[in-house]
Amino acid sequence: MFITFEGQEGAGKSTQIKLLHDYFLAQGVNVILTREPGGTVIAEKIRRMLKDTENTSISKKTEALLYIAARAQLADEVILPHLANGGVVLSDRFSDSTIAYQGFGNGLDIDDLVSMSNFAGDSLVPNITFYLQIDVQEGLARKLTQGAPDRIEQRELSYHLKVQKGYEHLLRMYPDRIKAIDGAQPQDKIHEIIIKYIKDITA
């Protein structure tokens, strides 16, 4: 089973994906936790390049291609082999992020991004995606308490509002796969909701 977590900056994805990872481990499930961009030696190098605030000259197309290149490496090296062995993969972001951030946020062609993402990920689609919703400004304020913002986080508010529209668009397109959860709720409440969804699809 392939499970992804999506959401804007400060939505609480990292916390919830770790809680779910611990839950699966306690159940004796063969589960791995990874992230995008990253998850492999090569992809983590790409991540540092994309997050570096000094790399202001990265073009929109280059940014998209770097994210997709990192996805290709992660899929080939980690995700696909683990799924082939019957394991569960949890990923902090996947192709939905590309549509929201590079498509809606940066205004790149959605069809092009979908085609490239399918090429990179071998047309892999998550079994379920948890989309943690949060007020854009509240999420950005949360991130500021965690340290200096990276290259993406420091973009203007209008950019992040476009990203939010992208996620809402995806939610309308794939209501069976993407489950929206209010990210402003207490962490334990969100975790309970996620576990209920997991139990429903594995029953």
Image (cartoon, rainbow, N blue to C red):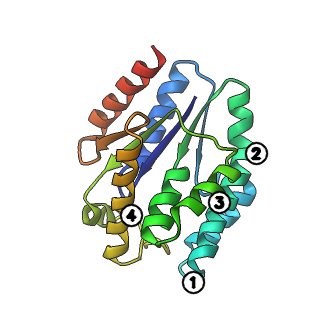
Q: Is residue 113 left or right of residue 169?
A: right
Query: Considering the numbered disc 2 on the image, is that residue within a helix, a strand or a loop?
Result: helix
The residue beneath circle 4 is 163
Q: Residue at x 59, y 86 (%)?
A: 57
The residue beneath circle 3 is 68
The residue beneath circle 1 is 54
Closer mark to the observer between disc 1 and disc 4: 4
The residue beneath circle 2 is 77
> Does residue 131 appear anywhere in the picture?
yes
Amino acid at pointer 3 = Ile
The mark nearer the N terminus, 2 or 4, is 2
What label sits on residue 13 in the rendered view? Answer: none
Q: CA distance from mark 1 to mark 4?
A: 22 Å
Expressed as whole percent of the image width and height from the top left, the position of residue 46 reads 67, 66
Asked whether 99 or 88 is in front, the reply is: 99
The mark nearer the N terminus, 1 or 4, is 1
Image quadrant in which you'd find residue 137: bottom left
Q: Residue at x 40, y 45 (%)?
A: 173
Is the residue marked by circle 4 packed among few (<14), some (14-19), or many (20+) residues within 10 Å? many
Q: Residue at x 41, y 19 (%)?
A: 199
Q: Is residue 31 left or right of residue 180?
A: right
